[in-house]
Amino acid sequence: MKMSDERLRREERIRLASDNERLSGLRPWLGIVATALSLLAVWMGLVWAPTDAVQGDVYRVIYVHVPTAWLAYLAFVVVFLASIGWLWSRRPWFDALAVASAEIGVLFTGLFIVAGSIWAKPTWGVWWTWDPRLVTTAVMFVMYVGYLLLRGLSTDFERRATRAAVVGVIAVVDIPIVHLSVLWMNSVHQLPTVARIGAGPALDASMGLTLGVSVLAFTFVYVALLVERIDIERHRQARVLETRR
Amino acid sequence: MSAPQRALLIAARELFAERAHPDGLAAALTFTGMLVLLESLAFGPGRAREPDVASGVFWIAILFAAMLMTQRSFDRELEDDAIDAVIALPGGRDALFAGKAFALGLLMVIVGVAGGALSIFLLDLEIALPGHLAFVVLLGLVALAPVIVMNNVVALRVRARVAVVPILSFPMLVPQLIAASQGSAAALAGDAAVALSWGALLAAFAFVYAVLGLTIVPAAIE
Amino acid sequence: MLRNVSLELPPGLTLLRGPNGSGKTTLLRAMAGLVPLARGRRQTPPSLLYVGHRPMLLRGLSPRANLAFFASFRGRTIDTNEVLRRWGLQDVAGLPVERLSAGQRKRASLARIDLETENVVLLDEPFADLDSDGVVLLRAALMSALARDQSVLLATHFHEELDRDAKQRFVLGDGELRAI
């Protein structure tokens, strides 16, 4: 039986250095594009897009609500893929990606829920409905929080990564099942579909364009934040590696 | 010895240990009974008899009871380091997850049947479709096991495990809760088709998580 | 924390010495596959028995049931009563292990050496908690294992007399392993 201390430590440091080189050229541009697109989206959403005939100006929340939904799910999928990546290869970069995406995901999921409530109250008179998408996203929010809590309570680097990765995988599998369950439940109870958040007004071309720009802007914001957060995490990982020497 | 046999050996050991010190089972049974009683009082006897309410009350109680029992089971593992003895054996990790999930499923059936009987008695419940009810309840109980065992394993050596496990498990168990309470309510009220379809969802849920557990979780056992 | 540790186990006795807290237990646990390695590789042996410092017996079961469990798990059927008698545990064979004394629990744990004859045997402070009779029994079990050409790694403080039988001797200090 043989065990030996490895060059892996050295290899890891080389990878970290090349990560930084590759990204450091990109990062300022990502931030600039994200900011520019966001400003454009804000202007288009608040000023340029026409007022809706039925819902008035309240409908403009859709320009936040829809992109955040898309990003919440995207972030979750990224956590899933990163978790698989870690379990497969044990490369620390995957763990950094997972935690970064999870943190940003919590943010966007929370935003989605708040935006949804802001839209629902003046439009349909309720703060919350049992719409499958809303319920599923709420469940997802709690899962993300649980994921981060688990990470926060763990101390050892590899164990934390493995535990979190397992949760990252099993949580994602649950999402479609949750969605299906709530959908069935609503159909059995024949809940009114009028108060379905997300079933927005018919969009005309300019609204559609504004929505597209918003989605793009939010996506760039996500990627920009992701890259920054991964960088922070990689530096933390490097410090842990150093103390092991 | 094959992998399923090893899992059964672990399950047998779990059941023997529970028989020697049934604190987990006792706690779960007492807790279920208490909760059913309390919730019925909170809703009032009239409301508590309605299929929806009676179902919901029962399944929430079972959820908490299952948490308690699994918690106790894993506390026992940690107390004597015997978990190390098992993990060090070839095929130990896989057998541990499978065996514990199986044993817990069985124990939950005991708790569920007792709790169900109590509910029926206390609330004088009318059961339109007893066969369908049994079907849904059994599947609902079994569906709990993989998820709760999984989360206990993941959080085994984490601080505040007793808080982390429910936080991780409850969102994951939302489909189980919905399906089990809706299915039970349907069986109580006499809607056979609805009861069966919820039962099918429970079976699928249990299957998916059993498979997922067997593939991923053993790697996470520390 | 262990660093720069490289170890190969040939058939025969390998002794591992080192002061308290030097990491002997961690090293053995890592070799048993219980501790994930931050760096390095562990070559899985064809079969391995790990007996830790603490008895590691299954609660709620008797010594007989414990040994039967471990034997069955490995697909063996062995006369547990005979082994228990050899280790002087016949009187307590059917009692739940919580009711045994520390010495009896240790013997039950060590009885696995006779039961599970694996290629590699890792023993962490096996002499701890044993009375003089127990020590004699353990030495006999060790000699049998060595006669079967098993690779035994024994971590201990004392018992210099074992140096005589040892093929390799190591000392663990400051997280590093040194051969002596």
Image: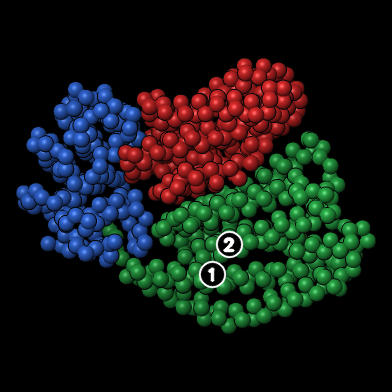
Chain colours: A green, B red, C blue
Identity, as a three-letter code, of the amino acid under mark 1: Ile
- Residue C61: percent from left, percent from top: 32, 28
Residue visible at 44% across and 55% down?
A154
* Depth check, front residue: C80 or C149: C80
- For image coordinates 71% across by 17% down, the residue present is B126
For the question of whether residue B188 can be seen, the reply is no
Residue of label 1: A230
- Pick the front one: A1 or B70: B70
Residues behind callouts 2 and 1 on a single chain: yes
Residue furthest right in the image: A53
Res A201 → quadrant: bottom right
Residue that label 2 marks = A103
| Label 2 element class | helix
Q: Amino acid at mark 2?
A: Glu
* Quarter occupied by the N terminus of chain A: bottom left
Q: Return the disc, 2 or 1, that comes first in the chain's sequence.
A: 2
Q: Is residue C12 visible?
A: yes
Residue reaching furthest to the bottom = A25
Q: Position of residue C18 (x, y in %)?
A: 16, 57
Q: How many marks?
A: 2
Q: Nearer the viewer, mark 2 or mark 1?
A: 2
Q: Residues within 10 Å of mark 1 (few under 14, many from 20)?
A: many
Residue C158 locus on image (x, y percent): 10, 50
Q: Chain of mark 1?
A: A
Q: Is residue B205 above or below residue A8?
A: above
Question: For numbered disc 1, what is the local secondary structure?
Answer: helix
Q: Is residue B37 left or right of residue C131?
A: right
Q: Residue at x 75, y 64 (%)?
A: A64
Residue C6 lies in quadrant: bottom left
Disc assigned to residue B199: none
Q: Position of residue B181 (x, y in %)?
A: 67, 32
Please report, as a chain letter, where disc 2 is located: A
